[in-house]
Structure formats: C-alpha cells, structure tokens
Image (tube, grey):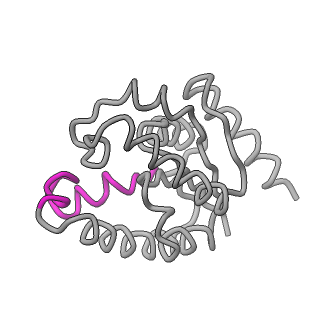
Amino acid sequence: MEKNIILTGMMGCGKSTVGRLLARRLGRELADTDGLIEARTGRTIPDIFASEGEEGFRALELELCRELSRGQGLVVACGGGLPTQDGAISALKETGLVFWLDRDPGKTYDALDVSGRPLAQRGRADFLRRYRDRAPVYRRWADYTVPCGDGPQAVSDLIFNIFSEVRRP
C-alpha cells in the first residue's frame, strides 16, 4: 500500500501550497480538507462556522478524514485544527506519514489574510495562544517536524527527500 503524506500545522503555514508542490512532483492527488469540505457542502468555511459553529465544522472534518484514510497515495493538506480531533488525525495516521509544518506563529499571522478564516479573525494574541495550545498536539501526532522558514519549495523538497528515504526497502 502506498502511504499517504499528511501535512499538518497552523493555518497559513503553507500546507496547501506545499501540498500542491508535492502532489505535482509525486504525481499524486492533493486532498485539501478545507477545500473538499467547501466543495462538498457548497458553502464556505465561514458560512459553516456561522450556521453550525466550530462543532458542526469539526463533524464534517471527521467524516472526511475517515473517508480519506481509506485512500492511498494521497497528499492530504489538513485544516489547522484537524489534529485537535484525535479521531480525525488518528484515522489519517493509520495510512500515512504525518509532517508538521512548523512556521514561526508571529510571522505566520502577520502574513495571513484573515478573511475566510474565522478563527484568525480573533486577533494576533488569540492566534499566538492557539499556536501554543496546538503545538504539543501537532508534535504528538507528527512523524516528522519540518521547519518552514525557507519557503514552500524548500519545505516541499525536504518532505520529498524524507518520504523518499522512508519508502526505500
């Protein structure tokens, strides 16, 4: 079975961009969890949060992760809060290697377009607190921690190299 590549980290750290680069390089399908939820529901993430709250959104995320865990050869770019749901991230980890894209949270927030990101709209202090709360969760689930200071291409190259080494018999 071809292992999936699971990308986790805070919103804005580059999971979707790195995921696209990896998927293209490996000839794999990219499964961006937030994008898939929007496509399937026909609603934006902010709309889902407004009508169903974070709890409703997390339920959709969990259902999607259970489905994705049955696939193989995927690059999965997870929403930032997905690893806080043990059921969602554990399902993905069963069939994949988890890479935590760890980017300086202050720089991440400062570069972030908060529109369309309900949890980022609470401000910089809340974002930094959320990072401090989530970092141990990301660390716990990660097979590999990847620093993200050198840009998406360098991060993609590093993950590609790690994954290539792991796949060798």
- Name the spot of residue 22 as percent of width and height, x first: 57, 40
**Residue 50, placed above or below residue 59:** above
> Which residue is rendered at x = 64% and y = 62% of the image?
141
The C terminus lies in which quarter of the figure?
bottom right
> Which residue is rendered at x = 22% and y = 53% of the image?
45
Relative side of 50 to 103, left or right: left
**Residue 106, placed above or below residue 2:** above
- Name the spot of residue 100 as percent of width and height, x first: 61, 48
Along the viewing direction, whichever of 121 and 71 lies nearer the viewer: 121
Outermost residue on the right side: it is 169
The N terminus lies in which quarter of the figure?
bottom right
Does the segment drawn in magenta span residue 36? yes
Q: In which quadrant of the rendered view does residue 12 lie?
A: top left
Along the viewing direction, whichever of 41 and 72 lies nearer the viewer: 41
Relative side of 147 to 35, left or right: right
> Which residue is rendered at x = 66% and y = 55% of the image?
139
Does the segment drawn in magenta span residue 98? no
Relative side of 35 to 82, left or right: left
- Name the spot of residue 160 as percent of width and height, x first: 69, 40
- Name the spot of residue 147 as percent of width and height, x first: 66, 35
> Which residue is rendered at x = 13% and y = 55% of the image?
47
Q: How many marks?
A: 0
Magenta stretch mostly in which secondary structure?
helix
Q: What stretch is highlighted in magenta?
A: 30-50
